[in-house]
Image (tube, coloured by chain):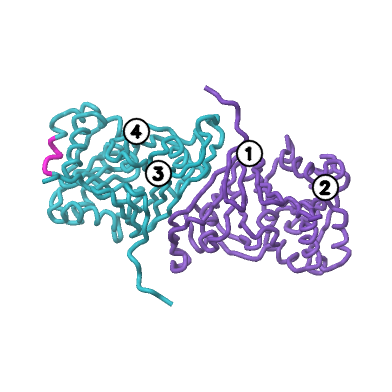
Chain colours: A purple, B cyan
Amino acid sequence: MTVERGYLLPIGGAEDKIAARVILTHFVQRCGGTEAIIIVIPTASEIPEEVGPMYKTLFDALGVQETRILDIRTREDADNPASSAVLEGATGIFLTGGDQLRLATILDGSLTGDSIQQAFAAGVNIAGTSAGASAMSYEMIAAGQSGMVPSPNLVEMGRGLGLTHEAIIDQHFRQRTRIGRLITVVMRYPHLLGIGLDEDTALEIAPDNACQVIGSGSVMIVDASQLLYTDIHEVAPDRLVSALGVTVHILTHGYRYHLDTRQPSPADLTPEKG
Amino acid sequence: MTVERGYLLPIGGAEDKIAARVILTHFVQRCGGTEAIIIVIPTASEIPEEVGPMYKTLFDALGVQETRILDIRTREDADNPASSAVLEGATGIFLTGGDQLRLATILDGSLTGDSIQQAFAAGVNIAGTSAGASAMSYEMIAAGQSGMVPSPNLVEMGRGLGLTHEAIIDQHFRQRTRIGRLITVVMRYPHLLGIGLDEDTALEIAPDNACQVIGSGSVMIVDASQLLYTDIHEVAPDRLVSALGVTVHILTHGYRYHLDTRQPSPADLTPEKG
């Protein structure tokens, strides 16, 4: 029997926590509903003592069997076998928002970081919001600025947790006008897809790399596979970058995308009208 | 002998008027330099009595032979043969900023409006900045809002002066985050190209439809010729619009684009480095 990896659920931040809670409910169902055992990792946050319990309350209210907080604040915590042991039996892991560089530099290569990767490979689902979404990719947007037009100075890269190697994930996308920095990184790494997630919007990546949009906003996919030319190799850091032949898709709730074929498709067709 | 139409120079607003004045100088040279006779039409502006003389001072300082202000403020002015006569002998026409709906609804179908079209067809060059750029197209963005993601409510359309039928022109593009409204209109009119001009940036359209970027910002071209799907026909006005398979080009100074072939190309190649 082949073991499938888990589902990956990057969320663009500010997911609804009060009303229909569509994204969080979806994640709970994906993790087994009343049998779900979810581990909240608030390491990205500057206030883990608040954010951890907040998500525990949320997941408990959504009817999971158990929510555990894995409150890793240092590299020493991350290398402690007791931390890693908290993951045992988990069906889902939730990475909170905060600073993705903090999250990645504390976890990456640590005992717990490796355990997260192994758990994911063994079928545990992983959701992450805001910084927790950005940190999922291997090439990670570590920091940056708002702006519509690509420019080298708009973005700094780092190494993420490596849960997907096909894409680079950005968040608060529409709300913070991050198209410029996402196109910049796709020009730098043209083999990778750029995924820009609006707030309260997620792209669920299934084990077979089929994806689906969930939430109230939109997802922008930036695909450079037909790229004709960019001058990013020669422009000064404060100048604008050219980009000829970029393919863009804007997807909303229910729309699908496949990371392998790079094909988008509409939500299930509605009955014919008119 | 075939008469070629003039060059069209839509400018994204806020063109440099103090330092190198690259765009305005280019337009003056295109119109004949010391032999240029330029007609300034401040009809779009709410303060034509200030904007007209300001541009006259600018063009005079750039060494033209003559600058005339054609101060049309009403439809009656526009139908007055004396207004139309001001265009005689012109080598260039300059449309100021302001409100493109004012400009278009005062000029379109009037005697002077028709004379402008005839002059253009006979080889007179036309530049327009901000509202004056938007008003050049046949399908015109009349008004709208900022935003990154397409949505029907972001934009209202109107009828422009019809100097180009291939494109829809938007301005202050990066500075006012207008990608959402430009993608919206291209979804509504998928056969038309969307051209988004940053401030202090122009796209010169030659009589053969070859284009060149001039200025300090960038030009975004939105091309729906490979469009796979959009739901704009069925979404409510306040909802987000999907757009699958949109091609985007980001061009900077010196880059070229051809409206007929829809092919972008880099600026003239620099000597090899490294």
- Alpha carbon of mark 3 to alpha carbon of mark 4: how far? 19 Å
Q: Is residue A15 visible?
A: yes
Three-letter amino acid code at the position of disc 2: Lys
Q: Chain of mark 3?
A: B
> Residue at position x 33%, y 41% from top?
B166
Q: Which residue is mark 1?
A: A253
Three-letter amino acid code at the position of disc 1: His
Q: Which residue is mark 4?
A: B101
Q: Which residue is mark 3?
A: B194
Badge 1 marks a residue whose secondary structure is loop
**Which mark, residue A56?**
2
Q: Is residue A158 magenta?
A: no
Badge 3 marks a residue whose secondary structure is strand
Q: Is residue B114 above or below residue A54?
A: above
- Alpha carbon of mark 4 to alpha carbon of mark 2: how far? 54 Å
Report if the CB atoms under discs 4 and 2 are less than 8 Å apart. no
Mark 3, other Cα within 10 Å: few <14 / some 14–19 / many ≥20: many
